[in-house]
Amino acid sequence: MDQEKYFDEIEAYLSGQQSTTEKAAFEKRMTTDAKLRSAVDLHRQAAASLGDPALLELAQKLKQVDENWKMPTEAAATSNSDAVAPTTLLSRLRVVRLPIAVAVSIALLIAFFQWFPRTTSSNPEQLFAQHFDAYPMVLNQRSALDTLAQAQLSNRAIQAYLQEDYQKAATAFQELQTLEEQPLYRFYEAVALLGDGEAGQSIPLLEKVLLQGDDLLVQQARWYLAMAWLKEGQGEKAREVLAGIKEGEYQWAAAQKVLAGF
């Protein structure tokens, strides 16, 4: 069977344009013809990939372009029999025996890579949104042995943090440091600020935690510093911090995913 007619028949079957008799005969052929079944599956998958309205619009535009190409071709054939008629767009695609759905998909992919920069698959703020989670709360509620003011403030900070009221939590942790200087309070204040969208304020706090060299917090602070730079749109600075996270350290696997996203 002629290849053009072969593809047209498949497309007619998938689009429901066959008569009842033609459809029954076609389906009977598929039961014994593995090549035909594979071709139908390929066409069906390609058609499914065109479910997006934008792709359908592109397909219509390609068809219109083809019609526009055909008109000068027919005119040239009548006015100059010796002239070589230009090949239409769709016929060129048919040369490689691709159904129109696959051809349109390829055209869209080409356009995509032309329109979008190849240097990054996601911008820094998108990467932040995909990977940021507040650090788990490891502080305990303060006991009655603490001063009343300190216990109340600590409990308020913890509860606000757990309820994701990060603005209130950041303020409470900042006030706690005036009563009791602790790197852990500064760390939680920084994470709370980051959760509240105040990455610029969290960066100096996290950098100070890193400088203090607390073994319990350095790895965590490094990860959240990278998140803060992402939130600020500073991809290169975030990449530099992430590159310093070694295998086996806190969030190493996540760091590799973020680096792969650049």
Image: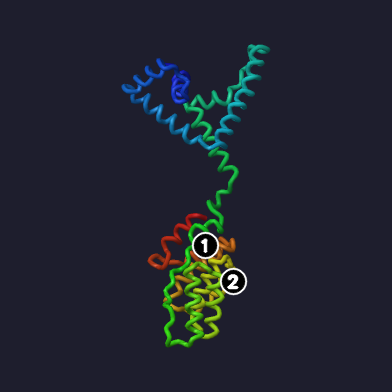
Occupied quadrant, residue 42? top left
Residue 257 image position (x, y, % from top left): 45, 57
Q: Which mark is residue 60?
A: none
Residue 138 image position (x, y, % from top left): 42, 74
Q: Secondary structure at mark 2?
A: helix
> Which is in the foreground here, disc 1 or disc 2?
2
Q: Which residue is mark 1?
A: 239
Residue 83 image position (x, y, % from top left): 64, 16
Residue 223 image position (x, y, % from top left): 48, 67
Instruction: Return the residue found at the far right.
Output: 79
The residue sitting at 33% across, 25% down in the picture is 34
The residue sitting at 58% across, 22% down in the picture is 87
- Front-most of 153 and 231? 153
Can you say whether 256 is above or below 41 in the image? Answer: below
Labels 1 and 2: the sequence-earlier one: 2
Q: Quadrant of the N terminus?
A: top left
Q: How many numbered discs, if any?
A: 2
Can you say whether 222 is above or below 36 in the image? Answer: below
The crowd level at tag 2 (other Cα within 10 Å; few <14, some 14-19, many 20+) is: some
- Front-most of 112 and 95? 112
Can you say whether 134 is above or below 76 in the image? Answer: below
- Front-most of 10 and 210? 10
Q: Which residue is mark 2?
A: 201
The crowd level at tag 1 (other Cα within 10 Å; few <14, some 14-19, many 20+) is: some
In the image: residue 136, left or right of residue 68: left
- Front-most of 11 and 249? 11
Amino acid marked by disc 1: Arg
The residue sitting at 38% across, 66% down in the picture is 248
Amino acid marked by disc 2: Gln
Disc 1 and disc 2: Cα gap in Å? 20 Å
Q: Contact (CB < 8 A) between labels 1 and 2? A: no
Q: Secondary structure at mark 1?
A: helix
